[in-house]
Image (cartoon, grey):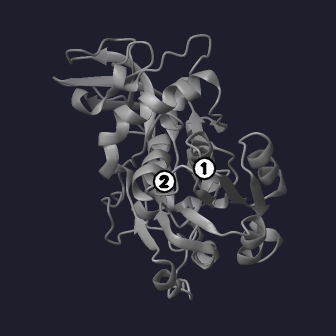
Amino acid sequence: MINREWHLLSRPVGWPKPEDFALVETPVPTPGDGQVLVRNKFLSVDPYMRGRMSAAKSYAAPFELGKVMQGGAVGEVIASHAEGIEVGDHVLHFFGWREYAVVDAKNAVKVGPTAVPAVQVDAGAHEVPLSAYLGVLGMTGLTAYAGLVRTASFKEGDIVFVSGAAGAVGSQVGQLAKLLGASRVIGSAGSDEKVKLLVEEYGFDAAFNYKNGPVAEQLREAAPDGIDVYFDNVGGDHLEAAVGSLREGGRIAVCGMISVYNNTEPAPGPRNLTRLIQTRGRIEGFLVGDHYDLQPDFVRKVGPWVASGELKYRETVVEGIENNLEAFLGVLRGDNIGKMVVKL
């Protein structure tokens, strides 16, 4: 049996290039004691992976050159040498970018009908696909929930602005804000099609295409009374615009800054940070890994909304391990609507 996996050959400068990577054939690994062998069914590709391709010091160790990369994955257990996990179970783990993975049982989380209550959703008549555990019910969903509820200290009645709002995290932030009682939710996206999706399907009160004019002007038009919360996925001119529209006591949760990930020179920061003094506002970055204690509360609260269809989500599905790299580059370009996953 052959296992195909993606290796990082060189560290990209600027935009990643195909020659920085290789799809390598290796033998299917054998699990040892306390381990399981998983045939991956869905792989996650996410913007943060670009940072791990660099050698720069960050919150996660860089990918090693000449070795397989990592990322979220969900798959079926086909061999088990671990108590509590049986052949046929489905597990969520962090050894993506490959077809087969050996995973320590302590690092494999059962999902679906055999899952423990903390990650199981009683969907009733609503089927919850395995891919959802990489997105709406996985790290993506928890990122949206933790950033909004804890980092941004969301309160009922807040006016919320979300950048990258048609993406996997952004689309959930806006919907969660509405479900939790926001008075108004505004989103930005990179196409008229995505703007229409935000308003007509996800229930945003207003949305705009940031390519159609200055972000600050479009935000002021969409939120004439200002904003209480900004959930930042983009950085750059979006962050500056949000600071400019912040109301007294406003909060900014910085989740990502996809606009600068491929820059080879430092990007200038917002020019209006003195407004934080006037508004008593605050900016705080966060990592979802610091908030896993919220997972049970997140699934208990959000799971029924997913199962009932109240919280809607989209997935952009790319077929085949051979297209994993192109799917990742698509995320950086903004090709995806909702969560980008690779189906094996």
**Residue 161, picture quadrant:** bottom right
**Amino acid at pointer 1:** Ala
Residue 235 lies, with reference to residue 36, above or below; the image says below
**Percent coordinates x, y for residue 217 in the rendering:** 76, 77
x 67%, y 37%: residue: 314
Percent x, y of residue 105: 24, 26
Task: Categorize mark 2 by other alpha carbons within 10 Å: few (<14), some (14-19), many (20+).
Answer: many
Alpha carbons under labels 2 and 1: distance apart: 8 Å
Residue 106 visible to an observer of this rendering: yes
Report helix, strand or loop for mark 1.
loop
- Is 91 or 100 nearer to us in this picture? 91
Which amino acid lies under the numbered mark 2 shown in the image of this protein? Phe
- Residue 62 is situated, as x and y percent measured from the top left of the image, at 34, 61
Instruction: Give 197 or 178, whichever is nearer the viewer.
Output: 178
Q: Residue at 60% across / 49% down in the picture?
A: 182
- Depth check: give the residue in front, 190 or 294: 294
97 w.r.t. 213: above or below: above
- Give the number of the disc on residue 201: none
Query: Which quadrant does the C terminus fall into?
Result: top right
Can see residue 260?
A: no
Badge 2 vs badge 1, beta-carbon distance below 8 Å? yes
From the image, tell me which residue sits under label 2. Answer: 154
> For numbered disc 2, what is the local secondary structure?
loop
Q: Where 18 falls versus 283 (above or below)?
A: above
Image position of 52 (left or right of 33) = right
